[in-house]
Amino acid sequence: MSPDNPDPERHVDDSDRPAPPGASGTTPPENEPPAGIPPSGFDPGDAPASTAYQSSLELAVDEPRRRLRTVATVLGFVLAFAVLGAPLGLLWTVLAPDTPVLKTAEGAIYAEPQPEQPIAADGWFSLLGLAFGVLAALVLWFVLRRRRGPVGLLAAVLGALAAAPVAWQVGRRVGLATFDRLLDTAPAGQAFTKPADLRAGGVDWLLGVLPVPHGNLLLPAFGAAVTYTLLAGWSRWPSLRPEPDPTAVSWASAGTPAPTAAPEPPAPGAAEPPRG
């Protein structure tokens, strides 16, 4: 080693050759990040094109699956509500009164000039249908939290719309066989009862293929649509989905004191503080 060449491993003639790493007199840059960590000015947009293509491809593949899951969810709830229309119809039959009739040579006539039982049957079906629609909307609002919005509203309306004809057909057929038998075999002048039925609702067939309900059968869907819309309007979250409360986080962070950092040890060549 000489005064002109402070590096013992570097020859005097190799002035342009860089010194090996770790040699005396060379120090790594202070701002160089550790291996595996991107620099502070790294832009995700500078990633290789293959990575961006792979992410876009995954999103394109996942989009049809997400749509299929949404359709399957809506159809599943519609089918479940349609099945629940059967007990709704049985409950309607229990609450709605039968109408007394008389057998004549032309058929059955009302035993009273203006019976109230058919009106009561329509009223009970309307009340039960509205209550069913409200409950259906509440169930979908709390069960489908991640799909609140048009998907939940569509499932509620279609489910209530499917449950209404099922409830009507199940309810009106309870005791209908006995009524038809008495209508055919009973002598003229015999009194019996007719099971509950709807006079203010029914189903029309569009082009002989598509069923179109009307009257009382639309009340469950109406109740579901109004209830779900009110729940969405009163929601405190803009996205209608539960979100973390920032105030609770701030109160928790304010109430918990931050841990104090331990004092750093003095440098090897630093002078000791005065002791008094």
Image (tube, rainbow, N blue to C red):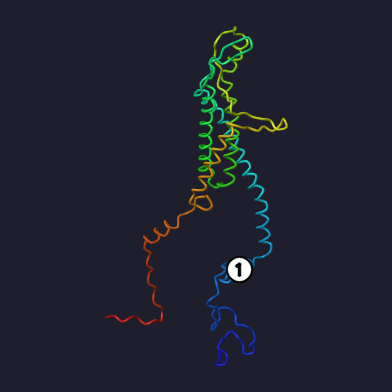
**Picture quadrant where residue 59 is located:** bottom right
Residue denoted by label 1: 43
Question: x%, y% of residue 24?
Answer: 54, 83
User: Taking 243 as reference, is 111 above or below it?
Assistant: above
Question: x%, y% of residue 220?
Answer: 55, 35
User: How many neighbours does mark 1 have within 10 angstroms: few (below 14), some (14-19), or many (20 or more)?
Assistant: few
Instruction: Tell me if 118 is positioned left or right of 251 in this view.
Output: right
Q: Quadrant of the C terminus?
A: bottom left
Q: Nearer the viewer, residue 275 or 200?
A: 200
User: Taking 259 as reference, is 241 above or below it?
Assistant: above
Instruction: Tell me if 172 is positioned left or right of 234 in this view.
Output: right
Question: x%, y% of residue 11?
Answer: 62, 87
Q: Residue at x 55, y 74 (%)?
A: 32
**Picture quadrant where residue 188 is located:** top right
* Residue at far top of view: 187
* Residue at far front of view: 113
* Residue at far right of view: 207
Q: Residue at x 52, y 21 (%)?
A: 117
User: Taking 162 as reference, is 180 above or below it?
Assistant: above
Instruction: Tell me if 75 is positioned left or right of 91 in this view.
Output: right
For the image, the number of numbered tags is 1
Question: x%, y% of residue 169?
Answer: 60, 25
Q: Residue at x 55, y 70 (%)?
A: 34
* Residue at far bottom of view: 3
**Picture quadrant where residue 68 is located:** top right
User: Taking 221 as reference, is 168 above or below it?
Assistant: above
| Circle 1: residue type | Asp
Q: Secondary structure at mark 1?
A: loop
Q: Nearer the viewer, residue 66 or 115?
A: 115
Q: Nearer the viewer, residue 154 or 269?
A: 154
Q: Quadrant of the N terminus?
A: bottom right
